[in-house]
Image: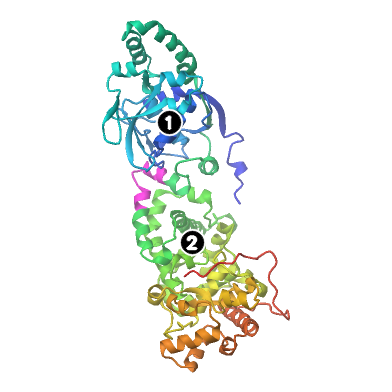
Amino acid sequence: MTDQSQEIPATTFDSTKESLEELLRSIRSGKLQVPNFQRGWVWNDEHITSLLASITLSYPIGAVMLLEAGNPQVRLQPRPVEGVALDGRIEPERFILDGQQRLTSLYQALMSDDPVGTTDSRKNPIARWYYLDIQKALSSNGDREEAILSIPADRVVRNFRNEPIADYSTTEKECTAEVLPLRLILNSSALTDWQLTYFQLDPSLTTQRVARWKQLNDQIIGRIKQYLVPIIVLRKATPKVAVCQVFEKVNTGGVPLNVFELLTATYAIDGFNLRDDWDKRSKLLRAEKVTAGIQNTDFLQAITLLTTRARRLGVLHQGVKTEDAPAIACKRKEVLDLGRSDYQLWADRATEAFRGVARFLHSQKIFASRDVPYQTQLVPLAAILAVLGPKIESDTVRNKLARWFWCGVFGELYGSAVETRFAHDLPEVLDCVDGGPEPSTVATANFVAGRLLTLRSRNSAAYKGLYALLIRDGGWEFRTGEPIDLQMYFDDKIDIHHLFPQDWCAAHGIERKRCDCVANKTAIAARTNRRIGGNAPSRYLGSIERNAGISSERMDEILGTHVIEPAYLRADDFEGFFAARTQALLDRIEGAMGKPVARDLPELQPVEGMDEPSEEDEQ
């Protein structure tokens, strides 16, 4: 683990308060902008009304987090807040990291000369001006949110028949209705002009309106002008890794900042759009359903592994001692240090490697993203394939890679703290392929026999792995007797289903945990599973045989490919079936891992603390 105490200053931020008016003026001048990774503002009309009501009441609206510009480690491409038109490019003094939606809403409602672009309750785009109903706002019994009026862009309110029911399209009409445009409150000159019209429009009401204005100024206008916003400012010296980590933990809205978003903004400085590049590559990966779950951060980690490996080899080639050479790594710090040129150097090879991952997974009979035991394990797998290149076509190499893969799955080694394992996997698997020792993932993997009894849902990588392993090692479809391949998997909707149905088990006193255990399940087509229903095995086997026109002998052969003893199924003997199948499944796991599973107990016992919830059949 990186010792970040040596890299991050003792104090990385300041906490203070700034007036809302000054913040909005900074936005208008371009001194305060947003990083280009921040996507557009999306608050709806109701949110804006509520926010404005809170400001008029001096209620807190939460802290805003800013980042001082000028940090050489955090070079971000700036973008003006939505609704701001700058005269040419202006370098910001600070960036908004958290609070973009609130500040954008307030800027557009209180300072912009254009209507606010927002959405209605049905998410339809609308344009609105925001007004304050003076009399409602000053009423002792009034609801402040009801005093904030959301008015269409043409300032005419219409009923459902599109008939005008209120018209605020001129200053005189606004004053007559006593509705004050909120966009004038922070514009002293414009507010004074409106105030004079309000006083003079009807001389008989002047005295009353002067008194009302004083009350309005004291209770609302003054509060808006004096409103203070809590500010957290990350200092210029804050390292990039700290900026990313802090923002991930405190962001309360908008788009979460991960390493991909931060690199997107960093690369944009050099005119390279990382998001567009990834969108093109992700379409290629989504073309295969099994790699549809690959995330942009997975892609970056694989490239970082390749980059740091190349750096290490380059330094070692120059004669630097092994212990002094930079390490292979892909933690947050290393990913954030990934330069644009590094990304562009490896991106094509990484893309092709992830497509190779799909081919490898297909060879292991894993066809859909939801059936991948560990999405995380695909990161080192892609990096390994990127380096191996054509070597993967060797049967010996594929077998070594498959053993590493299944040891990771059944050893359940990729659930947490995986980056360190990734860094070991890449050189160790490559060394193993070249005749070196077995990787640490293989050496340390261990499957406890009792764990089999607690595998009951897709929450477990080992559950998904065993499902795929049964197909890989020859599981035939019950009705057709054909090996399950990619086309059949999707065409026939192959999924994992019970052999002794849940209804049958409940009626015969079989404990739910054993009924739902993976030992009582196998890969079955949806059509076949409908014929199984809740029937006893002895009954549904006969039904399948008659419907498919196959003999009992052939059916027994098919069952054998799923390591099922047909005699127990035909006799509806759950206990005999369960005991035999658990041992047969352990044989399969041993074969995949290339190492024995301890089975010295007279009866398998569930692994304590590893119990999982049951799940219903998927189809």
Q: Is residue 566 above or below residue 410?
A: below
Residue 219, visible in the rendered structure: yes
Disc 1 crowd rating (10 Å Cα; few below 14, some 14-19, many 20+) is many
Depth order, front residue of 352/585: 585
Q: Is residue 89 left or right of residue 254?
A: left
Label 1: element kind:
helix
Name which residue lies at 42% across and 12% down. Answer: 213
Label 2: element kind:
helix
Disc 2 crowd rating (10 Å Cα; few below 14, some 14-19, many 20+) is many
Q: What kind of secondary structure does the magenta stretch mostly adopt?
A: helix
Depth order, front residue of 55/239: 55
Asked if marks 1 and 2 touch (Cβ < 8 Å), the reply is no
Q: Is residue 226 above or below residue 33?
A: above
Residue 533 coordinates in the image, percent (x, y): 50, 77
Q: Circle 1 is placed at which residue position?
A: 49
Residue 86 coordinates in the image, percent (x, y): 32, 29
- Residue 267 lies in the magenta-colored region: yes
Question: What amino acid type should be assigned to the residue bearing mark 2?
Answer: Val
Residue 317 coordinates in the image, percent (x, y): 49, 60
Q: Is residue 35 above or below residue 578?
A: above
Instruction: Looking at the image, tell me whether mark 1 or mark 2 is earlier in sequence order.
Output: 1
- Residue 4 lies in the magenta-colored region: no
Q: Circle 2 is placed at which residue position?
A: 379
Residue 379 coordinates in the image, percent (x, y): 48, 61
Q: Is residue 619 above or below residue 376?
A: below
Name which residue lies at 47% across and 12% down. Answer: 215
Question: What amino acid type should be assigned to the residue bearing mark 1?
Answer: Thr
Q: CA distance from mark 1 to mark 2?
A: 46 Å
Q: Is residue 354 left or right of residue 125?
A: right
Depth order, front residue of 546/392: 546
Render colour scheme: rainbow
* Residue stretch in magenta: 264-277
